Amino acid sequence: MPPARATSSARALEAILPLIASGQPYEAHQKARTFASRYSKSKQYDTAIDVLFQSARELLKVGQQGSGTDLTSFLLDVYDSKDEAVSDESRGRLTQLIALAGPSGSWRKTIIDKAVAWSAKAGPHPAGDPDLHHYVGELLYKEGSFAVAEPHFLAGGKRDSGRVLAEMFVEWAGSDSPGGPFALRGTIPYLLNGNILAARTFIVHFVSQLTARRPSLLSPHQPTPIPVGEPTEGETDEIVFTTDSTLNFAQLAVRVCQRAQGDKNKAIREAWVRLCGTYQSKGGLVANREVRKALIDLAELYFAIPPPRAQQANPLGDMISAMFGGAPPTGGGAPARRVLAPAPPASTPGLD
């Protein structure tokens, strides 16, 4: 005997879907809303979800983006009413509808924004479900919408997201754009979100693919990679030195953050300060005001180094002073310090 949900939704769908097939999308849309409202009010949420999903899917298939998007939005409202958890099934309905909505107009963006907001409330990830973000990022990347795909890969924070983001950035950079800015656009956001594995996956694949396309980027002084520490999961961790100092900095920054233990490891804290000081003294992008601000945030997050005092003339000197017990910033209203829990002792040496 079929489950009650299938029987109930089947009755409604028998009245809705033939209307779509016969070229009456408006009537089908109205019937779907009426049935779903009735089921939702009587707390038959699963039946309402099935009616809305199948109706929206068929409407989107015949190019009725407005009606399909409206029913998808209603579907997400029912998710909220039911307190639907993020799962393969609940996410899978949304990814199907997102794909069918197509790239034209703002319909798909409307669905994506509301779906991400639901997943942020219904799941453990405040930025939204990583698998949903990754799916959306890949979909947009394949369509050539690099700028719109980028924040989804960064918000996803998965290792696969880092890998595909690297591939997209290499394609975006083309044959002549500097690689350094793209390296920082991938590594810094991942590190600020505490996604060290995604940051490492990103930078490893980005440098590998970029130098394969542009062999002239390899440093003539160190043309072969330098192994760092012991191999993990069958992979050797290597630094590839290039003629782009920003690219070199991004690789080193990820490895130092990976070995961070808050204020427990003095050598690694000193390595971070020296790394930032060395590359900022060279000028260029690493000395940019916004990048310096991000590096100060990373110093606090990974190495428990308090931010410098306001209007300090020598930010690097103040970072060193704070590391060795100098006075922290004074005054009320300072935000609470955000520090990652120290990692267990590293089995590999620091990059000092």
Image: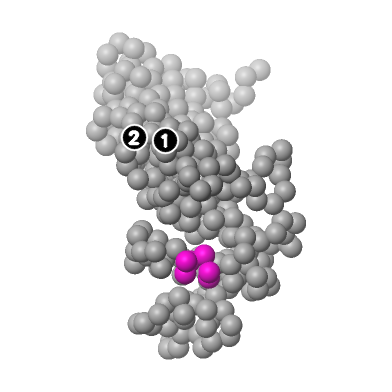
Which quadrant, please, contains the C terminus?
bottom right
Q: Residue furthest front?
A: 221
Say what secondary structure mark 2 lies in: loop
- Of the residues under marks 2 and 1, which one precedes in the sequence? 2
Q: Considering depth in this image, is 329 or 258 the residue closer to the camera? A: 258
Q: Mark 1 Cα within 10 Å, few/some/many (few <14, many 20+)?
A: few
Q: Position of residue 330 (x, y in %)?
A: 45, 88
Name the residue type under label 2.
Ser
Say what secondary structure mark 1 lies in: loop
Q: Residue at x 51, y 38 (%)?
A: 208
Q: Which residues are magenta?
A: 273-278
Q: Which mark is residue 94?
A: none
Q: Which mark is residue 214?
A: 1
Q: Residue 218: within the magenta?
A: no
Q: Residue 277: within the magenta?
A: yes
Q: Residue furthest left?
A: 105
Alpha carbon distance from label 2 to label 1: 8 Å
Q: Considering depth in this image, is 89 or 315 the residue closer to the camera? A: 315
**What main secondary structure does the magenta stretch of the protein show?**
helix
Q: Is residue 89 left or right of residue 118?
A: right
Q: As displayed, is residue 66 above or below residue 269?
A: above
Q: As displayed, is residue 32 above or below residue 336?
A: above
Between label 2 and label 1, give the one nearer the viewer: 1
Check whether the beta carbons of the residues at disc 2 and disc 1 lie within 8 A of each other.
yes
Q: Position of residue 253 (x, y in %)?
A: 53, 58
Q: Considering depth in this image, is 328 or 236 the residue closer to the camera? A: 236
Name the residue type under label 1.
Arg
Whether residue 74 is visible to the viewer of this picture, yes or no, is no
Display coloring: one colour
Q: Mark 2 Cα within 10 Å, few/some/many (few <14, many 20+)?
A: few
Q: Which mark is residue 175?
A: 2
